[in-house]
Amino acid sequence: MSGGTTTRVDARGGSLFAGSASVRALVYVALAALLFGFGAIAPTHLASEFVLRIGAGGLLLGMLALSVAFLMSQAGLVVLGAASVYGGVGYLFAIAMSKWDLSPTAALLFAFCTVIAYAAVLGALIVRTNPLAFMMLTLAAGEMISHSVMLEGLRDYTSGADGLVVTFKGAVFGMTAADFANATQFWPIAWSAAWILGFAAFAVRRSRFGAILRAIQENEERMRFSGFGTYLPRLAAFVFVNAIADVCGLLHVLNSGFVSPESLGLSVSTNALVAALVGGVANSTGPIAGGVLFAFAQDQFGAHGFTQLLTGLAVVVFIVLLPRGVIGGLIEGARRRSVLSSKRRRTA
Amino acid sequence: MLEIANLSVSYGRVRALDGVEIAIKGAGALHGIIGPNGAGKSTLLDVVTGRRSPSGGAVRYRGKDVTRKSVAWRRRHGMARSFQRTSIFQDLTVREQLTLIARHLGDDRLGDVIEVMNLGDCLDEKAGRIAYGVQRRVDVALALIGRPELLLMDEPGAGLSAEETLNLFLHLRDLVRDRGMAAVVVEHDVDAVFACCDVVTVLDLGRHLATGAPAEIRADARVIAAYLGSAA
């Protein structure tokens, strides 16, 4: 019936003629390596400390946006409580050092693992719910944590509205607190982290697990009728995106040396969501680019004194004109051009 | 292979299934289920495949009570299903969805399914962009992956012409015999069912009316009165 085509299908469904694809992949890897190296070094020589600081803040927001975007695009779930992880891990890191005398590295690991455990428990309770309920539950959990740091009974640990200054002696991964606070030294770290997390999200997206998540999002019933459990993949995805937000929160607290209730606030979560939408949620580059764009735009809008008004206008314009986000729009444009040019070649 | 014992399903005061008892024979048998609208045919398939829990009774598969087993468990143990409304992954290519499920179920003979369902020409098309008839074949192909022992199909002829439905049933009959599996088909097109099925069960208002060979069912006075009428 279709022997000619089926002979090219192996059990994994892959094509057996993939020579040119591997050459193309090598070219992409080389270009990415060049871009990575250039991006890590050049700004530290070319940009002012002020610009580097905003850029690094943008990368941190972008990484948080990446966590939000991943779950949106792969599982159709919107997280409105990303800040609870982002700020919460900072609090845990600070408290573990100041109250329990843990070394900075041990405190870092403790904070990271505790947040992962929290995400696993929260996820176990809420990933079964429908997308709207899920969104509201993440918001509720985030708000509970945000308000709990203000409780009088926890003031000895959290310092209430004053927040906590996070200082540490010695070094974490070979860097002192002063190194992390230095914009020139922090930039390559934030840049590398953005690449590593972006690549991790890309790899998961392209993996079989990513395909399972997308398939569950599209037709959960058919997945169950194909022998798949749909609960554990969703839970794993939720823990994965919280791990991204976890790393991002740790970098934030190491860089700023301070953690306050503001870092747990709803505005951090919504900024991450907006950054994801501005950059585009369907790939790993979009949210990170969206975070950087958002940070620089906020700075410019702030200079004019109309931060919220201009941000709101810009978000509306971006979402209406570029529904797939800046990077998503660029990719779509390139794809259309490629289709058009191949059609022209065929007709010629 | 499959034993449905005293199965009941209620929606409030309405009894969609009322003490239904059916035994589905094993390898190579095509079992048709017919009945007027509201007879409980689709509900029966839902309960057998785990989509819906029964109010009473039991479903036994290969001698084991599976009434409380999950949909995924049943599928992994050889009970597959296709749907009345095509249930495929519109945004995935045909190849992507077939390979995803084949790998999960450890089926290394995906090429056979592709050939049997004649899908070789559309493997790299997104499923949402192919013709409806081909989508129906993809739906059946998804159910055939993993070489199920029992295939349950809810109106596979929905949306197809009478000729297409008959061809599909003939194809199914061959498939069931070649693969040595059992298949249960719920269908409105009685001509196709009588022409191709080995055994036919008739449901009416949630109750089991009759089971037998197509010729016996055609001649059954209760079936004629309740459902077939002049079509017999």
Image (tube, coloured by chain):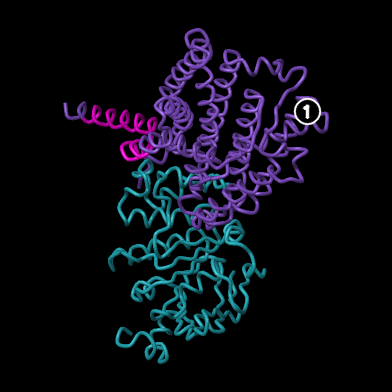
State whether residue A279 is above or below residue B74: above
- Number of labels in the image equals 1
- In this rendered view, identify the residue nearer to me: B19 or B137: B19
Farthest-out residue, top: A45
Q: The chain shown in cyan is which?
A: B
Say if the magenta span includes residue A332: yes
Q: Colour of chain A?
A: purple
Quarter of the image for the C terminus of chain A: give it: top left
Q: Amino acid at mark 1?
A: Ala
Say if the magenta span includes residue A10: no
Residue range of the region highlighted in magenta in the rendering? A315-343
Specify the quadrant of the image occupied by residue A194.
top right
Local crowd at mark 1 within 10 Å, few (<14), some, or many (≥20)? some
- In this rendered view, identify the residue nearer to me: A326 or A236: A326
Look at mark 1 in the image and give the residue it sits on.
Answer: A106
Does residue B201 appear left or right of residue A263 in this picture? left
* Residue B178 percent across, percent down from the top left: 48, 59
* Residue A144 percent across, percent down from the top left: 64, 49
Does residue B47 appear left or right of residue B221 in this picture? right
What subunit carries mark 1?
A: A
State whether residue A289 is above or below residue A272: above
- In this rendered view, identify the residue nearer to me: A69 or B104: A69
Farthest-out residue, right: A101
